[in-house]
Image (spheres, helix red, strand yellow):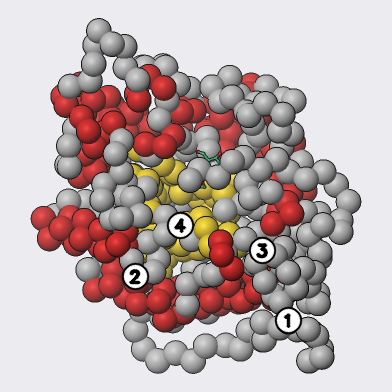
Amino acid sequence: MAGMAGIATVFALLALAGTAPATSLAASHPSPMTSRTSVPLGAAVWSGCTVATYVWPAGLACPVASYDARYRSTFAQNFDRATAENEFKMLWTQPKRGRFDFRAADGIAALAASASKTVRGHALVYPAANPRWVDKPFFLTPWTRSRLLDVMRTHIKTTVRHFKSKFPGVVTEWDVVNEPFLRSGARDDNVYQRVIGNDWIEQAFRAANAADPDALLYLNEFDADTPNARQRAVYALVSDFVRRGVPIDGVGLEMHVGADGRYPTLVELKNVMAQYNALGLRVSVTELDVLRPIEGDPVLIQRAAYDTVAQACQESTNCDGVTIWGVADRYSWRGAAQAATLFSRNFTKKRAYDLVRCRLNDPKPLSGTWTPKDCGPVELVPETASTEPTGPTGGSSTASDPAPDAEAGPAAAAPAAAR
Ligand code: 9MR
């Protein structure tokens, strides 16, 4: 197991080798897209689990992605930008009140900068990733609205300014608020909601904009990619923001899909993206991964799911990015056996990667005529191949990607799902 200082050193050394990418200026919000010749493909990266501020569940193996050269090269060679899977969260960056600790987060920014990639900052306010001192204040000094607002604003300002000055041009956008709604469409019952009240989300966006007027600002939400109560709640909130001039640029669609063997249809996804387009907002697919289906050929179904999401983004002119939640199955939070990402346990590229890349490299332009290039069929197997249901684990695949369980190497630890 490696210590946090070691992780930061590894990434800091890597940073010396590269040049930071240029920033894009976004003086007004929502910030319209000015060109669309390709859509960036990102990956969530993480540095490992042994840091002082984060207690890994006992008994689980600890993945040390930062020390795996294949992990770093797979990211550098195949992705355009990074999201810190955990290290930018408040639990890591302000573990004690007023004591900021950006060492692990800097490691991620340095990894990206060393490979000339940008970073999506994830996330400034994510109630599920609060440190304990935010959720359970000392009983003699309970939160008041003004005290907690001050804490939230200070956290946002300090974090955004830290990256803006230490890694200029690298962190170009932020998930300002993460997962503020419940499945019912009601507000999540978290400390900001209870103490500050309904305007806590607006206050967070205003603080982020004040800290970096050039950054693109997103509200990121789970399961808001199909028409449902949570999606309607997100839509109502962001349309109100646009109407009143609250600074926001886009909506992040997480897209952890494949539970119950399902994923959104192309029409559903394009309709949701079009709703935000009508408001002048961008959409970004921010955390895409696909669980093994319950029935049917797992590789083909996962491939089709990836292709569908990429096609929706390709054909929606306000879609400005797709990020996969993990570089490779080996270190995926889903566990390697789910084979949920675009690279196998042994870092072999899957056909789904080529399909996604092909579509994102050929997006519908902002104006003019467009005929999409042929990316080839999803299925590249003999027509006799069986796609019959094969049982509750999805069975084995007849397609040509590496079988998830057939390869050597340790399984990555899979943290418990957050919901
Ligand atoms: O993938 C992340 C996992 O390693 C963490 O244990 C977990 C707890 O913070 O967060 C996971 O990432 C979540 C992301 O930050 C927000 N959307 C849902 C993701 C999966 O739970």
Amino acid type of the residue that numbered disc 2 sits on in the rendered structure: Pro
Which one is closest to the eye, mark 4 or mark 2? 2
Q: Secondary structure at mark 4?
A: loop
Residue drawn at (81%, 64%) of the image: 403
Marks 4/2 in contact by CB < 8 Å: the verdict is: no
Image side of residue 318 versus residue 332, left or right: left
- Nearest to N terminus: mark 2 or mark 1: 2
As drawn, which residue projects farthest toward the left? 244
Q: Amino acid at mark 3?
A: Arg
Instruction: Pick whichever of labels 4 and 2 is earlier in the sequence.
Output: 2
Measuring from the top left, give residue 260's x and y in whole percent. Answer: 56, 65
- Upstream in the sequence, badge 3 or badge 4? 4
- Residue 9 makes an appearance in the image: no
10 Å crowding of disc 4: few (<14), some (14-19), many (20+): many
Whether the residue under disc 4 has CB within 8 Å of ligand 1: yes
Count of numbered circles on the image: 4
The amino acid marked with disc number 1 is Glu
Q: Residue, x 76% and y 41% (percent of image)?
A: 68
Question: Residue under circle 2?
Answer: 227
Q: CA distance from mark 4 to mark 1?
A: 30 Å
- The image's mark for residue 388 is 1
Q: Are marks 3 and 1 in contact (CB under 8 Å)?
A: no
What residue is disc 3 on?
A: 292
Q: Which residue is mark 4?
A: 254
**Quadrant placement of the N terminus:** top right
Amino acid on which disc 4 is placed: Glu
